[in-house]
Image: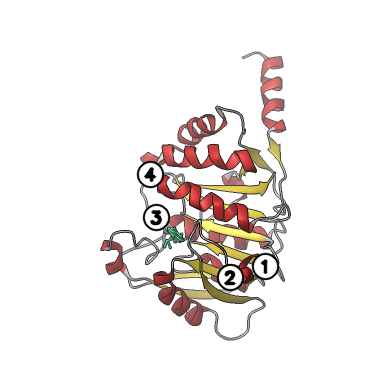
């Protein structure tokens, strides 16, 4: 490529970097055109080569508790490793993208890219609740949600980690994707929706999107961390989501420097 072509290519790349929603950093737009999601998969798998690195770098799913420092505290997240063997139960242990998202949010607030103090946050598929706990410690009014039979561990983790003085608040509510939402989740609509590792089953994509559609106004910013396991499920999600949401990928230079992983991706979504 000659000098002029290189400059043109760099300018074209620069044009794809935009600021969307309430996240202050610039993100790389995922095109809503027919091949946009497929092109994103090629780029992601080409740049990050997720299959060449180990899964679960930041978590040990066989331990009963996982320690993590965040927001000036030593958090202790309880897990139930035995439940992982139960078909359909995935949230009884932590996943890398939850740790990455929690530390990303902390880093974004500390570096002035996000304001969570006093903001309403709904977390989807909270699992053990790490991300929601971090958001509450950063001052947000958080509602952590999951399937009805997944809430006991979630409540225990909130009690264990959110004792004493902290700025925000945390409540737990059941939420099944695709089903009618409790009014306290949508009145008022949240400022942020956070979710990690919620895109892994093609059958759940449309229900998840239906919930995002209900939960989001144009002022709501979704921050979603995903694990790069299955390109076709992620492609299906992006293809469907980009019809209704502007979608941008946050490059790893903006993540918490100690919590980056080639197997994880972070997107920001805002309703069109
Ligand atoms: C892979 S786990 C991720 C848990 C947590 N976010 C993390 O990153 O550690 C997926 C989570 O989504 C929840 N989930 C799956 N299907 C759901 C549905 N249809 N409605 C609500 N939550 C669901 C699971 O119960 C689980 O907590």
Q: Is residue 75 above or below residue 111?
A: below
Residue at (72, 59) in percent of width and height: 112
Q: Quadrant of the N terminus?
A: top right
Earlier residue among tags 4 and 2:
4
Classify residue 117 as left or right of residue 95: right
Measure how far apart labels 3 and 2 are at the Cα level.
27 Å
Measure how far apart labels 3 and 1 are at the Cα level.
30 Å
Kindly check if marks 3 and 4 are in contact, taking CB atoms under 8 A apart as contact. yes
Could one spot residue 260 in this view of the protein? no
Kindly check if marks 4 and 2 are in contact, taking CB atoms under 8 A apart as contact. no
Q: Quadrant of the C terminus?
A: top right
Kindly check if marks 1 and 2 are in contact, taking CB atoms under 8 A apart as contact. yes
For label 1, the residue is 120
For label 3, the residue is 57
Q: Give the mark count.
A: 4
Rendering coords of residue 94 (x, y %): 41, 63
**Neighbourhood count class around disc 3 (C-alpha, 10 Å): few under 14, some 14–19, many 20 upward:** some
Rendering coords of residue 172 (x, y %): 53, 74
Earlier residue among tags 4 and 1:
4
**Neighbourhood count class around disc 4 (C-alpha, 10 Å): few under 14, some 14–19, many 20 upward:** few
Earlier residue among tags 3 and 2:
3
Q: Tag 4, which secondary structure?
A: loop
Q: Dividing the image into four quarters, tell me where ligand 1 lies.
A: bottom left
Q: Which mark is residue 143?
A: 2
């Amino acid at each position: 490529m000659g000098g002029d072509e290189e400059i043109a290519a760099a300018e074209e790349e620069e044009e794809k970097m935009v600021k969307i929603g309430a996240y202050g950093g610039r993100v790389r737009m995922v095109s809503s055109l027919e091949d946009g999601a497929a092109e994103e998969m090629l780029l992601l798998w080409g740049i990050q080569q997720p299959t060449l690195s180990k899964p679960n770098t930041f978590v040990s799913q066989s331990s009963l508790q996982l320690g993590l420092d965040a927001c000036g505290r030593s958090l202790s997240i309880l897990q139930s490793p035995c439940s992982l063997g139960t078909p359909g139960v995935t949230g009884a242990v932590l996943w890398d993208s939850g740790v990455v998202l929690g530390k990303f949010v902390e880093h974004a607030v500390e570096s002035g890219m996000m304001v969570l103090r006093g903001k309403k946050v709904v977390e989807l598929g909270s699992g053990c609740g790490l991300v929601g706990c971090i958001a509450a410690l950063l001052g947000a009014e958080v509602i952590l949600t999951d399937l009805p039979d997944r809430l006991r561990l979630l409540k225990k983790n909130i009690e264990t980690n959110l004792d004493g003085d902290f700025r925000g608040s945390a409540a737990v509510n059941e939420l099944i994707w695709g089903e009618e939402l409790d009014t306290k989740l949508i009145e008022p609509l949240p400022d942020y929706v956070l979710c990690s590792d919620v895109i892994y089953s093609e059958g759940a994509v449309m229900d998840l999107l239906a919930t995002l559609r209900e939960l989001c106004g144009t002022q709501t910013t979704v921050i979603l961390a995903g694990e790069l396991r299955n390109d076709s499920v992620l492609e299906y999600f992006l293809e469907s989501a980009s019809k209704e949401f502007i979608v941008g990928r946050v490059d790893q230079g903006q993540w918490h420097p100690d919590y980056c992983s080639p197997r994880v991706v972070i997107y920001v979504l805002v309703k069109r």
